[in-house]
Amino acid sequence: MALGKNRVRLQQAHTLRDIAGRFGGKVMGDPGTRVHRVATLENAPAGAIAFLANERYLPQLKSTRAAAVIVSEAASGATTLPRIVCDNPYAYFARVSVLLNPPTPARTGVHRTAVVDRSAALAAGVSVGPHAVIGPRVKVGAGSVIGAGCVVGEDAAIGAGTRLFPNVTVYHACVIGDRVTVHSGAVIGADGFGIALEGERWLKVPQIGRVIIGNDVEIGANTTIDRGAIDDTVIEDGVKLDNQIQVAHNVHIGAHTAIAACTGIAGSARIGRFCRIGGHSGIAGHITLADRVEISAHTIITRSLDQPGTYTGAYPFEPNAKWRRTAVSIRHLTELIERVRALEKKQSGPERSEP
Amino acid sequence: MALGKNRVRLQQAHTLRDIAGRFGGKVMGDPGTRVHRVATLENAPAGAIAFLANERYLPQLKSTRAAAVIVSEAASGATTLPRIVCDNPYAYFARVSVLLNPPTPARTGVHRTAVVDRSAALAAGVSVGPHAVIGPRVKVGAGSVIGAGCVVGEDAAIGAGTRLFPNVTVYHACVIGDRVTVHSGAVIGADGFGIALEGERWLKVPQIGRVIIGNDVEIGANTTIDRGAIDDTVIEDGVKLDNQIQVAHNVHIGAHTAIAACTGIAGSARIGRFCRIGGHSGIAGHITLADRVEISAHTIITRSLDQPGTYTGAYPFEPNAKWRRTAVSIRHLTELIERVRALEKKQSGPERSEP
Amino acid sequence: MALGKNRVRLQQAHTLRDIAGRFGGKVMGDPGTRVHRVATLENAPAGAIAFLANERYLPQLKSTRAAAVIVSEAASGATTLPRIVCDNPYAYFARVSVLLNPPTPARTGVHRTAVVDRSAALAAGVSVGPHAVIGPRVKVGAGSVIGAGCVVGEDAAIGAGTRLFPNVTVYHACVIGDRVTVHSGAVIGADGFGIALEGERWLKVPQIGRVIIGNDVEIGANTTIDRGAIDDTVIEDGVKLDNQIQVAHNVHIGAHTAIAACTGIAGSARIGRFCRIGGHSGIAGHITLADRVEISAHTIITRSLDQPGTYTGAYPFEPNAKWRRTAVSIRHLTELIERVRALEKKQSGPERSEP
């Protein structure tokens, strides 16, 4: 297998002068230096621009073959390469990368194999891929891309400039905002897990709410967001969801919160704005998290948090043999506390009785 | 984005008299009160019927704008609204919601873009959506709905009144019962993780069992149920599985067990009937859980449980700084026990040596 | 529902002599014994060959109705059934099962409903299923099978003898090797979770790397493997991934490592060769695991491991009432250590002060 041959196509070159003209920052070294692609410091080929956002990669700054680098003021003296000095090298790099890697424009129009209901309303410049299915009364805003194999249920509404990658499913009546990205395999609006016990049988509770997704949201591959049981499930503007996240019915996620992969959010949980939630974590149902709460990876939050801060509950790992002993010790922890209490009592007892 | 505009269509109105005639319960207040939709107490619009199943929402009962409510005997005096008094308001509400939100009937017949093998047998009233694929010798029972983009492999059998939402995959030879709901992205019958080590290479063990799913089962979005290695994987009647659950090969789940999202069940585990398993939990392979076992969220069960009861193993979270100290303490827990033992020995030692 | 009726079709019979001729081992009993299917000891019907790989199933060896069994030298005296004696009965069984259950050959050729770009290059004997979509400049090697509803993005390359089961999505420019199996719902090459904070807004960092998958890899249902942020995400030869695994951008998984279901691997983690990782576990970002590391199920690894061995961090479960006390105790664990220290000080203090 010849690796590298099918590398994504190279882009037009830009000078550092041109880049700083667009995004600010100060050029040091030759402002006419041309770059045509971004790279890591470690693997930069000729003509690439790289960045340093973390001091531990400083050694790579010395050895990189990049044509130019993006650095902070503090690191600007650590290299003689042509460079752009700025406040936030990672964010600056993101902008440069967008410049050098513009998204491939999708072919506009409806593919001949797509099935679009005649009552659906597609705005200008919409692209509907092969075998996509657009149900009755669906609205799709200008310039949106519905990938191959996507299914959009009746009465759903999709904003402008939004992209559904292939094989996304959107259930009926759900609403997706503008400039939203949904990755493959995501399911928006499946029924929430609403079941009522009657005797020894489960009755299904119809899930009649919707999913409402704001603008500038990104939803990862195979993430599932359930429709509300009665009221709606709401994802506010700017929320970023990684892959394989489960959002249960009637969850509310505040604006600009970012959640890493494999996290599960139980029904009716309310998560604040600007929160950051680590991977594989869990939020219990019916609790509220304040704005700017940070949850570490593999942590389960079981009660409401009304203060910002970082909360953690990942159980520490050990070599297996030691873990076995620790696990047994944990099971006897309350007894250990009793034993310490007894010791304290005994020790203080004689002291108190001393003349 | 104008929210609420694409709300699911309103249904026909019913009087409380009519509802109680169907489902029992006692009407208090005007039995001619008409309701046409269900709602939460908090957000009920005019014409809605809401319910109170949890005492903590009692204050909302005072302020609701619902036209009528479903309450227990105990709460029947807490409002003057027209109401239906019954034993199990949540289950009653489920029935009323089904009445007011009948499932949208799918258009029967095979969509022109579906690919149905000529040897497949579709019963009366089956609906096959756009781009669905039905393989050789597949059987689909009366009134079942195969959603857009679903793929049903050769020799699979699907019962009557069953619904596969779009983009479900059913592998060859799997069997799904009657009145089953499978949500989008679910995969039924992929190969189990059967690999045998030979020297330093993994040999694949063919997975030749099937998945057998009983009647009245619900399977959530992106849930995966692997086919058996040799014998079958079995999901009994009435089991309810939430989203993103992984059921490994040769698992057996007893009737009417409900499992919340993101749970993983390892190979050959045998789960009893009427169990309830919380989200993000794990069941180890080759163990057996008795009937009526309840597992809390984020709990990993590593040995068989032969008694009903609730079992928990979620590690408690703390503010991050405190967690760091606790995590270190846990790693020294066995040493702490040694120290306590030494203290006990010393303390009892001198006592014993006292004259 | 008549179970068993749609059992996968029976295969041609083989004698033990024939089998030992192919795979080695010693035949005891009648070498002309014919077997036509594999089975478990417990459920073997007439004509089946079963195996014993675990001593705890020895009792089943006595009662099995199998026509023949595969056993180790140690167990060869425990039965009088016709048998093949070999070093590694489970691996031997895997080979026999492949012989008796050859994969159903897919119909070669491109289904009339598939959409294959005219610039795509399909080698001899390729099968493209109904409604599959193959983008521009895609290459597919000889004998590979692209299942129904799969979408393969532009410039992707798929090797020879590889099988994508239905509804797999492969993003643009990704590379998949020879003899790879990818199960339904898997998503290869979606964007990594690359976002940079600028003020209070998230900027998307274009994900321009690829996913590179070696030869003889298996990828489970609904598993997601993200494309690299800048450099590539790499899965080496012989890696086996179970269902619902999340592999973040720029992860590198060494050859012949096996990972069980529901595991999450964070960005830029580097996992060695011949590792075994249990289900529902997590590997933190930017860490390195040595070759031959084993991670137990439900364990989160938060720092690099440079030594082979087994590491565990699963929190032990208890009956709920006891768990509540333990959880409170854990939150007071650092205080308990202080109390023990105080006891030790007091106890040693007086001793030291004694004349």
Image (spheres, coloured by chain):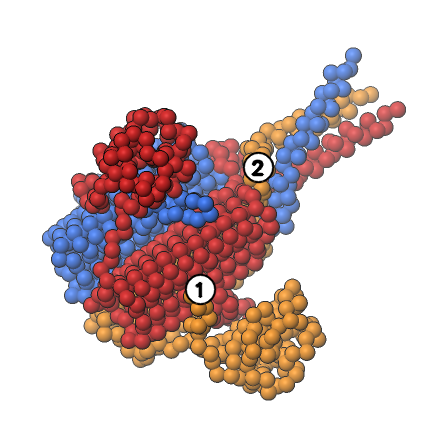
Chain colours: A red, B orange, C blue
- Residue A44 found in image quarter: top left
Decide: is A112 above or below C55.
below
Q: Amino acid at mark 1?
A: Val
Residue corresponding to mark 2: B321
Task: Please state which amino acid type lies under the numbered disc 2.
Answer: Ala
Residue C111 position (above or below residue A92): below
Looking at the rendered structure, the secondary structure element under dot 1 is: strand
Q: Position of residue A310 (x, y in %)?
A: 54, 43
In the rendered structure, the residue with mark 1 lies on which chain? A
Q: Chain of mark 2?
A: B
The answer, for residue C96, to whether it is visible in the render is no
Q: Nearer the viewer, residue B287 or C121?
A: C121
| Residue B95: image location, x then y, percent | 52, 76
Question: What number is the disc on residue C56?
Answer: none
Above or below B281: residue B90: below
Residue A94 at x, y = what percent? 35, 43
> What is the x, y in percent for residue A167?
30, 60
Residue sitting at x 45%, y 38%:
C301
| Residue nearest the observer in this picture, A151 or A34 | A34
Quarter in which the N terminus of chain C is drawn: bottom left
Q: Which mark is residue A211?
A: 1
Q: Is residue C196 visible?
A: yes
Is C44 in front, or is B5?
Answer: B5
**Label 2 residue SS:** helix
Crowd rating for badge 2 (residues with CA inside 10 Å; few <14, some 14–19, many 20+): few
What number of labels is visible? 2
Give me the residue at 37% from left, 26% from top: A77
Most extreme residue toward the right is A355
